[in-house]
Image (cartoon, coloured by chain):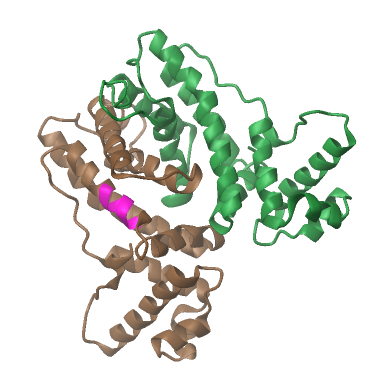
Chain colours: A green, B brown
Amino acid sequence: MASEMAGTRRPGGRTERTRLAVLQATLDLLAEQGFTNLTVDAVADRSGVHKTTIYRRWESRDGLVAAALRLGTEQPWTAPDTGSLAGDLAETLLELVQYFTEPGLRELPTASVLAAFHSPRAAEALHAFYEDRHGRSAVMVTRAISRGEVPAGTDAAEVVRVASGPIFYRLFISREPVTAADARVAAEAAAAAARAGVFVRDSARGGAESGA
Amino acid sequence: MASEMAGTRRPGGRTERTRLAVLQATLDLLAEQGFTNLTVDAVADRSGVHKTTIYRRWESRDGLVAAALRLGTEQPWTAPDTGSLAGDLAETLLELVQYFTEPGLRELPTASVLAAFHSPRAAEALHAFYEDRHGRSAVMVTRAISRGEVPAGTDAAEVVRVASGPIFYRLFISREPVTAADARVAAEAAAAAARAGVFVRDSARGGAESGA
């Protein structure tokens, strides 16, 4: 989410400039100090926007962080197109690994994951970010279906979860190093499972349940 | 880790009883209040062990939490044996899902994951716990190899990471519900990738690199 959050939606308007200044200051402070140390006062200082304005629009520290995290869904991320599902997933995961491991980049996404433990509104914003990413990633699977690589009805969100799960597992659960080689293995694993038809939704199989 | 941490290693000894009382009180408070609110004073109160004793043995709040989390590696978890790798993984993941979602159970493991963000010593302890689990899970893959289900040289730790990754991804990254059906899909996915040979270590392929 980090660098992707730096852009603008409708540049020019004063309200929009204020919004971006406040949310960018929030992201900067989140990355520098973490969620538990973040204050509205510090955001006001950093952005040069008066704190009554901030409270009027975002209500609280939690509201501010949630809005800042949602900025990520406004950015123009496009899924890679390498010619194979495994290749597309590998490129996506290499970007993910870089983003969550490189000093100077990793602070914000790590703070975002952590904020969701402390704030239900941050958790909802994180959820919205990844839901958006699942939607934008679907084209990788659609193309793989049309190439005949994976069966029709393959659930794209599940492919993304299985591909990126092992990366996040290493980062935040087993607390192990994550390398580019790990990204490639995880991409290959998700692609192999997809080819084997593991992610075909029940509805696509003709079952009674509707797909997720 | 939760209920598995309640047992004893060498019951009877007074030092051992004190150790377990303190570490169990730490786990209880961690589950109830989380890492950031935990204090050595509260652990002393809860365990009935004087805080100078606690400081002498564990040095700090961080040392105490790390030792408490390591208690999990002393417990006798055994991998299931259902007759297939997918079945074994599904059973392991169903247990994981229950443990991380059921009220009354989920608080401690969730607090453990969170503690690792705040304390490098807690992160090391979490790492040791999952490393231990990777080791204990290896037998599922060894058996699958001897049944001819998956190729020789399949990296058992990687199978576990890919199987459990999507569960943790839903819990802590995309913040989505996790169901038994999700556990079964994740188990099938890891087993399918293993059958396809994705997790065969480079060393087992005769490559120059040694396996993890």
Task: State the quadrant of the C terminus of chain A.
Answer: top left
> Does residue B154 lie above or below B50 as drawn?
above
Q: Residue B96 colored magenta?
A: yes
The one nearer the camera, B95 or A13, is A13
User: Residue B172 location, x and y as percent?
Assistant: 47, 48
> Does residue A152 lie above or below B127 as drawn?
above
Looking at the image, the residue that sits furthest to the front is A208
Task: State the quadrant of the N terminus of chain A.
Answer: top right
* Residue B188 as seen in the image, left or right of residue B119: left
- Measuring 48% from the left and 40% from the top, which residue is drawn there? A178
> Does residue B64 lie above or below A195 as drawn?
below
User: Residue A44 location, x and y as percent?
Assistant: 84, 54
- Measuring 74% from the left and 35% from the top, which residue is drawn there? A6
Q: Kindly indicate the quadrant of the structure image that contains residue A191.
A: top left
Q: Residue A134 colored magenta?
A: no
Count of numbered marks: 0
The one nearer the camera, A14 or A95, is A14
The boundaries of the magenta stretch are B94-99
